[in-house]
Image (cartoon, helix red, strand yellow):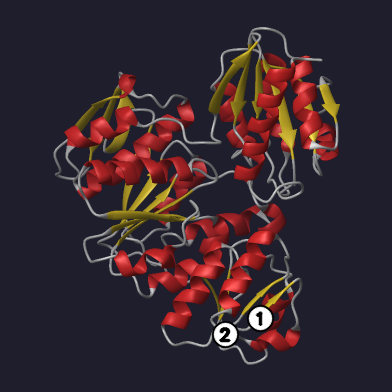
Amino acid sequence: MIGLGKSGFAAAKFLMAKKARPSVTDDSTNPKVLKNARALEKLNMPVETGGHTASFIENAELVVTSPGVPRRSLPLVLAKKKGIPVISEVELASYFCQGILVAVTGSNGKTTTSHLISQALAAAGRPSVLCGNVGHAFLDFIPKIKKRTVVVLELSSFQLEDSPSLRPKIAVVLNIGRNHLDRHGTFKKYIRAKERIFSNQRQGDFTVLNYDDPLVRRMAKKTPAQVIFFSKKPLAKGVYLKNGQMIADIRSRKKLLIDSTRFRLKGAHNIENILAAVAVAAILGLPQERLEKSLNRFETLEHRIEPLGGYAGVQFVNDSKSTTVESTKAAILSLSTPIILIAGGKDKGVDFGGLEPLLKKHVKQVILYGEARKKIAGAWKWYRSARITERFEEAVRLAYKSADPGDTVLLSPMCTSFDQFGSFEERGEAFKEIVETLKRSGKN
């Protein structure tokens, strides 16, 4: 096992329960990793932390890697050299899964869409679990999954990259944007990783695709499964929006009509997420009345364009989950007030120039922080209302000082959190704490 986060820890425990002889290596010494290491050592499992050694995988027959482990990591380099198979925790879990797999991927929106599907299943009384990139290891749920259990599986390109035989009954691709080029090297390889989600499907399976995204629409020619398109515009068949109504017209199934004006979840990007969830619900035959109630109740998830209230006329919005330019565009367009934008963190090899056209119209000031701060500023040719600072806390304080009554301070970083935080959740919680401190102290 490489990595002692949630997926690696789950895989190690699962394999030991199956009478295998796992060992785990992690180059980190953060408290969570060390806590997991101690737990496994008590089970007499070989564990190394703080670095990787070649001897540790000398006799390995299979390598299960965590999604965040870079390709240049010593164990992966050695595994490739020795011809040792490398798989993800998701791939391993799929070998033992009896349930119905609904897999969701995309550059943006996959967590929200996965939650929408999961909540719809719960409202319909269907047995289901939600796992994968959403934060819960797939393997942890295997003992609970029966034949009728629907497994809603959020998948990143990292997980798909190492899942060569995964076959979902329903595969959903929401959108494709330039992302994770630091990991995949080229945009073409990133797209290829995403396409893994349907590469093993068969004629009786379903691939749900976003018709409005040209790259995703073209995937219809590559999947062996039945294609169900969704769109914000009317379609001849599929799931689409027309005159405020969401219409699901799939094969000979009863047509669903859902009033989209009653949704609490706002924004054009979320309409796409809901359309995808409705497509899955229609394929699974969920009752319309319960589906509609579920969609109407659904609200913004934490760290995803999450309103934090205001102080002295200034509103605060936490979009720490944003790690792409496209997700930050969606956050900006979801707000109707002038914006003070906080962005930065660890770069994923993307082009930040695509945000510039929105800045002049919607963003009064940008505060850039972290490793990527200079690269982001350098990507903008004419936008000059940007200030740079290294530390996150200082960026939040500068944003608050720059804001006038009626403005919104928006944290939407476009980057991962790993330069100064362990996760986007940790970054979002830090933002909330700093905002509360500023509210108490004012702008002094």
Q: In the rendering, at what x and y percent does residue 133 appear? A: 50, 54
168 or 313: which is nearer to us? Answer: 313
Q: For the residue marked with disc 2, what is the amino acid?
A: Asn
Q: For the residue marked with disc 1, what is the amino acid?
A: Lys
Residue 273 position by quadrant = top left
Q: In the rendering, at what x and y percent does residue 303 appear? A: 56, 36
255 or 155: which is nearer to us? Answer: 155
Tag 1 residue: 80
- Whichever of labels 2 and 1 marks the residue nearer the N terminus, that label is 2
As displayed, is residue 196 above or below residue 43? above
Residue located 31% across and 27% down the image = 296
As displayed, is residue 168 above or below residue 271? below
As displayed, is residue 273 above or below residue 140? above
- Res 44 label: 2
Residue located 48% across and 39% down the image = 213
| Left or right: where 284 falls relative to 196 | left
Q: Could you classify mark 1 by the number of other residues whose Cα lies within 10 Å: few (under 14), some (14-19), or many (20 or more)? A: few
Residue located 64% across and 52% down the image = 187
Image quadrant containing the N terminus: bottom right
**Mark 2: secondary structure:** loop
Distance of label 2 from label 1 (alpha carbons): 28 Å
**Mark 1: secondary structure:** helix
